[in-house]
Image (cartoon, coloured by chain):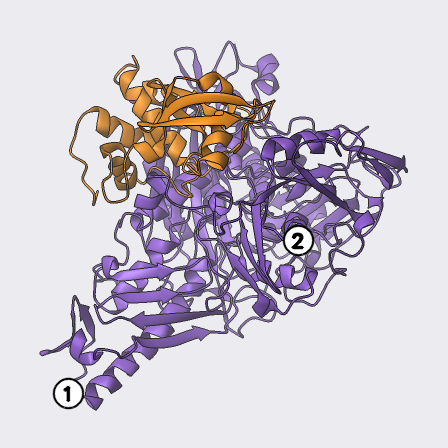
């Protein structure tokens, strides 16, 4: 993409790869990931910060990428679902979501997992009620909530995931 | 039969789980099929409820860097005129042809499309298009005095909407115990987290449509009709769909608009609906007013039942919310009247939303049953037992398999029904506690389905059918069904669905996919087995009658074991078989049978209500379901959790408001239309009776997508009454409905 007068230059690291990009100042981090970089694992559910499907990590903290202007991401480290695990090399949280069936349609799942991973680093209490609260910014319309809580709790407790449970 | 199966009924983890948890499952808007980056399209929607478009002012748009094209009815016949009922090859959510005329019938109607190279430009341009209108009189309010009122004859399943038997008035005149009340349910929206999205890619006269649809075959036929193509020249791909709940069931104008734009521009076009678009572009559950009258003798036996439903339709969409259909079949009653009226209003079109009719209808019926039990001084479960029947009240047929009484027993035990007390008397700390219950039911449907099975040289079985997994677990269920028939592991089965070029199957709606594919897969497995046996004989093997086993790289039967490489020599094609069925169950024109097919269940809810603030919580719900054989214990339980969660939303949160003056939905966002979040959902307890229904199909499964939100809102409403003594006859029930009357 050629730089033009109304474009901005940003440099940012996404999943440990550094990108130098000329962007439209209106572009959100979500649209940058999806439409410019084809990192389509991050989903757009509402584009208003109300559903959580677009959750990614910026400098280690969970953010709603639909409410984050890419122009403000110069110099940051972004991690998306593509930087967590692959089908052949799952992160334990991904394994736990599969074992506990923490999704149905799968569309909110990238956001759920990015939130769940951030929750591991946040100061939440140990019980399920704390996880329900911590995960309430991520809507699952299919209604997998009890299974999501079970998956997150299992990873938090460092238990081995029983894939046939 | 397969009760001893090693795979049927087991909690097999989803075979597509690795894709869905790593962001590698590609939904419609994720597809990048061509070298050319798709152009981005954004809808321009009508801002008035009735009238005609007199022009578009594009002056603010023309100079935008990257703006490509604006399309509207002024661009000639982009889309072939679709006259309902069209050619019968598809079901559409609306009966009008987009971009055909200047006419506007509701706010949010698609009247234009902006296409630009970048999404940001398309969004800015769509906002900058100025539409000029000539408004005409609109009928928006539900009680608009001059709105046309219709009495539709049939629901889209072919079932009668106006039903009468016996003599209701005579029975009411003699009745000792009666209840009569009006219940209302609000406008509700599906709100799948994936918005509808269509990516259209043309290659000459052939178009590939990556569409977020619950029915690829239906979608293909719709696009073919609208684009004046042979259906063979349309391919719809939907390998992953981010939920639907009905709003992606029938096809909607945006799919045609995207295909038309891509054809005009000779470039791939991606149209992703915004969350706000979703409120007016693909249906909603319409508001209903339901008057229910029940009469019973002193033993609680129903002597009269009347269920009158008033709802509405848009000028261009013919959906009827069929609230009374459940009432016509569920309880034994000789004197019954069920009627449905619809007013024609200038509102966006309705469409089925998870359990259309059953969900709002059972809120009314099962609330009324609770009121009748109260009046009789009878336990609500006992009242339902006394009106239980083994005969379908609509047609006198026996149920193929009905274990509803067991559902009541198991549910009552699991929720601790014996703890229930008189209304408004159970207090724990600051909370008022109550228990409520309701009956759940949903029809068993099946439609024609064909399936192709292939056995590879490496021992892999491939099953292919044009169905789709909208989150139900169908990928996994299909792998289990094939694995069961060849006594192998689901890991050795590859599932190919989500492609309209495959042998045709049903759309994912009406809880019918599993039962439909069950019959087709069973048949295809039989054909493949015969083919394999013939092949074994041909290569000189002697066979007994023992079943075939696909065992890694070998095909076994009895003591015989033949390597796949011997069965399928180098250079030979894989062994393929096709099977299927044209049988229809549950719809008009179906198989002649002396049985009726329905799933049943019982839902119980415990509520706790803060005595000072009226806040309503649901600490526990129990659902016990009689849905035939469960194919996958894990994904089936998940669907039930999801339906019960839908029920919590319907009971306590969900409502779309319409402004009667402007015809606009007031709260078209997830910030103002509340759906349950994680913190709203507590213990959900699910039991499946797991009793096969082999009269319905060879795997004994019926279907379970919808039944778990049928009755759920009534169970919660009845629990609220039990906790507080306050009867709320509308949904959702909010704390302001309780605050004034709470027992102190």
Q: Residue at x 18, y 74 (%)?
A: B564
- Along the line of sight, the residue nearer the viewer: B293 or B155: B155
Drawing shade for chain B: purple
Q: CA distance from mark 1 to mark 2?
A: 55 Å
Residue B256 is labelled as 2
- Along the line of sight, the residue nearer the viewer: B78 or B238: B78
Q: Is residue B97 left or right of residue A33?
A: right
Residue at mark 2: chain: B
Q: Badge 2 local density, few (<14 within 10 Å), some, or many (20+)? A: many
Q: Which chain is orange?
A: A
Q: Position of residue B52 (x, y in %)?
A: 87, 42
Above or below, B657 against B387 in this view is: above
Q: Are marks 1 and 2 in contact (CB under 8 Å)?
A: no
Q: Residue at x 45, y 42 (%)?
A: B382
State which tag comes first along the sequence, 1 or 2. Answer: 2
Q: Badge 1 local density, few (<14 within 10 Å), some, or many (20+)? A: some
Residue at mark 1: chain: B
Q: Position of residue B260 (x, y in %)?
A: 68, 53
Q: Residue at x 20, y 76 (%)?
A: B547
Above or below, B230 against B702 in this view is: below
- Along the line of sight, the residue nearer the viewer: A99 or B253: B253
Q: Position of residue A95 (x, y in %)?
A: 25, 38
Q: Is residue A82 left or right of residue B448?
A: left
Residue B733 shows up from this direction: yes
- Along the line of sight, the residue nearer the viewer: A33 or B389: A33
Quick one: SS at disc 1?
loop
Above or below, B620 against B637 in this view is: above
Residue A24 picture quarter = top right
Residue B186 shows up from this direction: no
Determine the residue located farthest toward the left in the rendered image.
Answer: B559
The residue tagged 1 is B541
> Which circle, 1 or 2, is nearer the viewer?
2
């Amino acid at each position: 993409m050629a730089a033009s007068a109304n474009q901005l230059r940003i440099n940012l690291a996404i999943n440990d790869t550094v990108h130098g990009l000329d962007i439209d100042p209106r572009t959100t981090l979500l649209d940058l990931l999806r439409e410019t970089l084809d990192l389509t694992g991050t989903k757009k559910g509402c584009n208003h910060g109300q559903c959580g499907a677009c959750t990614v990590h910026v400098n280690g903290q969970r953010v709603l990428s639909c409410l984050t202007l890419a122009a403000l991401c110069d110099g940051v480290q972004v991690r998306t679902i593509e930087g967590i695990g692959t089908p052949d090399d799952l992160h334990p949280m991904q394994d736990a979501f599969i074992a506990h069936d923490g999704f149905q349609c799968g569309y909110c799942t990238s956001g759920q997992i990015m939130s769940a991973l951030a929750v591991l680093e946040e100061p939440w209490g140990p019980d399920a009620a704390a996880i329900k609260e911590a995960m309430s910014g991520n809507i699952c319309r299919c209604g997998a909530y009890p299974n999501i809580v079970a998956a997150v709790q299992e990873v938090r407790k460092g238990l081995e995931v029983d894939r046939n449970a | 039969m397969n009760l001893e199966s090693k795979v049927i009924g087991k909690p097999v983890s989803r075979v597509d789980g690795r894709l869905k948890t790593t962001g590698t499952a590609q939904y419609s808007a994720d597809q990048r099929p061509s070298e050319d980056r798709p152009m981005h399209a954004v809808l321009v929607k009508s801002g008035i409820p009735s009238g005609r478009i007199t022009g578009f002012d594009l002056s603010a748009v023309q100079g935008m860097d990257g703006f490509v094209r604006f399309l509207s009815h002024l661009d000639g016949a982009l889309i072939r005129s679709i006259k309902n009922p069209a050619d019968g090859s598809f079901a559409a959510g609306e009966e009008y042809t987009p971009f055909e005329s200047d006419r506007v019938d509701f706010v949010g109607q698609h009247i234009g499309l902006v296409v630009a190279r970048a999404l940001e430009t398309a969004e800015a341009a769509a906002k900058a298009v100025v539409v000029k209108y000539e408004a005409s009189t609109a009928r928006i309010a539900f009680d608009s005095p001059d709105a046309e009122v219709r009495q539709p004859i049939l629901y889209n399943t072919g079932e009668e909407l106006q039903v009468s038997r016996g003599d209701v008035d005579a029975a009411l005149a003699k009745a000792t115990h009666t209840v009569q009340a009006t219940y209302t349910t609000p406008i509700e929206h599906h709100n799948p987290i994936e918005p509808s999205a269509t990516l259209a890619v043309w290659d000459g006269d052939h178009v590939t449509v990556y569409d977020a649809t619950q029915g690829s075959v239906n979608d293909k036929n719709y696009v073919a009709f609208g684009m004046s193509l042979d259906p063979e020249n349309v391919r719809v791909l939907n390998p992953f769909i981010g939920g639907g709940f009905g709003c992606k069931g029938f096809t909607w104008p945006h799919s045609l608009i995207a295909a038309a734009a891509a054809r005009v521009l000779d470039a791939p076009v991606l149209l992703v609906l915004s969350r706000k678009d979703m409120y007016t572009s693909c249906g909603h559950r319409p508001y209903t007013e339901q008057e229910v009258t029940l009469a019973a003798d002193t033993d609680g036996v129903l002597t009269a039942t009347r269920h009158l439903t008033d709802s509405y339709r848009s000028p261009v969409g013919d959906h009827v919310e069929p609230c009374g259909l459940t009432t016509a079949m569920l309880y034994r009653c000789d004197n019954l009247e069920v009627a449905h009226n619809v007013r024609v209003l200038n509102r966006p079109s309705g469409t089925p939303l998870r359990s259309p009719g059953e969900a709002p209808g059972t809120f009314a019926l099962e609330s009324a049953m609770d009121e009748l039990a109260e009046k009789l001084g009878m336990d609500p479960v006992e009242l339902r037992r006394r009106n239980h029947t083994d005969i379908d009240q609509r047609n006198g047929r026996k149920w193929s398999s009905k274990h509803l009484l067991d559902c009541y027993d198991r549910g009552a035990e699991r929720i601790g029904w014996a703890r229930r007390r008189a209304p408004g008397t159970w207090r724990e700390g600051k909370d008022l506690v109550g228990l409520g219950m309701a009956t759940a039911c949903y029809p068993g449907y099946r439609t024609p389905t064909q399936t192709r099975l292939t056995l590879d040289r490496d021992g892999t079985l491939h099953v292919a059918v044009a169905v789709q997994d909208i989150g139900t677990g169908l990928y996994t269920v299909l792998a289990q069904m094939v694995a069961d028939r060849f006594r192998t592991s689901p890991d050795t089965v590859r599932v190919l669905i989500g492609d309209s070029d495959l042998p045709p199957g049903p759309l994912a709606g009406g809880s019918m996919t599993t039962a439909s594919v069950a019959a087709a897969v069973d048949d295809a497995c039989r054909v493949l087995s015969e083919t394999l046996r013939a092949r074994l004989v041909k290569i000189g093997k002697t066979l007994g009658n023992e079943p075939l086993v696909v065992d890694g790289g070998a095909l076994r039967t009895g003591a015989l074991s033949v390597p796949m490489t011997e069965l399928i020599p180098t250079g030979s094609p894989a062994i393929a078989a096709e099977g299927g069925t044209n049988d229809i169950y549950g719809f008009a024109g179906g198989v002649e049978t002396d049985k009726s097919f329905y799933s049943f269940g019982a839902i119980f809810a415990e509520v706790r209500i803060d005595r000072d603030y009226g806040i309503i919580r649901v600490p526990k719900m129990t659902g016990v379901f009689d849905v035939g054989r469960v194919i996958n214990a894990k994904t089936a339980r998940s669907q039930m959790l999801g339906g019960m969660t839908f029920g919590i939303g319907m009971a306590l949160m969900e409502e779309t408001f319409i402004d009667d003056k402007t015809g606009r939905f007031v709260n078209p966002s997830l910030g103002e239309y509340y759906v349950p979040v994680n913190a709203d959902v507590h213990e959900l307890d699910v039991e499946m009776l797991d009793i096969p229904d082999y009269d319905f199909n060879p795997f004994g499964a019926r279907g379970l997508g919808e039944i778990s939100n049928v009755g759920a809102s009534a169970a919660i409403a009845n629990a609220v009454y039990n906790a507080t003594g306050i009867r709320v006859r509308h949904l959702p029930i909010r704390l302001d409905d309780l605050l004034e009357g709470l027992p102190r």
